[in-house]
Amino acid sequence: MGIHAYVVSLSRPDIDEARRVLDELFEETKETGWNGYGSAAVHPLTYALAVRFLESLPLSMPAPEVNADPDGEISFDWDLGRDRLLAVSLGISGRLSFIYQNRAVRMRDTLWFLDQQIPEELVGLYGNLKR
């Protein structure tokens, strides 16, 4: 009997595309005033955390829309339409400020992105949006 090795590709085209957008976004926002209204620059450490955040997303969560906030944070948005949204802003400290809306249910809170782990609470909230 021979040993058979199987290679499973963990490449995620949606995450690869979000990473490309993040890279371009960082180039456009790494200087103060990037939006023409005195916005804070996105710090290289915030960018590095954002890369790790994207790469840490579980398979149950598709890639989010990626944007920069005027305060220098990176935002990740999952907008499923019809009043179903999870919007997360990531700061340089690893703080994740989020807004969740699932029809009439609304929530705003703070979690932390530590040890390259997406908080289970965020994964659960996204799962609730799909129901």
Image (cartoon, grey):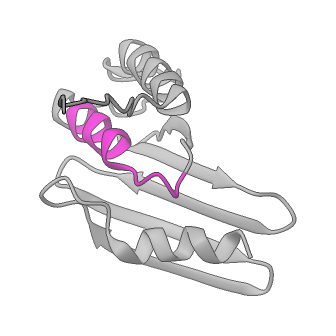
> Which residue is at a point 52% across and 54% down the rendered structure image?
61
Above or below: residue 87 compared with residue 11 = below
Find the residue positioned furthest to the left.
115
Q: Which residues are magenta?
A: 46-61
Q: Is residue 90 left or right of residue 24?
A: left
Could you say where residue 22 lies in the image, as x and y percent from the top left? Answer: 43, 25
Q: How many marks?
A: 0
Tell me the residue at 47%/67% (across/down): 98
**Secondary structure character of the magenta stretch overall:** helix
Q: Quadrant of the N terminus?
A: top left
The answer to whether residue 70 is left or right of residue 116 is right
Residue 57, given in percent of the width and then of the height, sits at: 39, 50
User: x%, y% of residue 109?
Assistant: 42, 78
* 4, 19: nearer the viewer: 4
Is 119 drawn above or below residue 67 in the view shown?
below
Pick the quarter of the image with the C terminus: bottom right
Q: Quadrant of residue 118?
A: bottom left
Residue toward you, 61 or 88: 61
Q: Residue extending furthest front?
A: 1
Question: For the view shown, which residue lies furthest in the right direction?
Answer: 82
Seen in the picture, residue 106 relative to 94 is either above or below; the reply is: below
Q: Residue at x 28, y 50 (%)?
A: 91
What residue do we see at 53% from left, 22% from top?
A: 17
- Nearer to us in this view, 118 or 21: 118
**Residue 104 inside the magenta-drawn segment:** no
Classify residue 71 by image quadrant.
top left
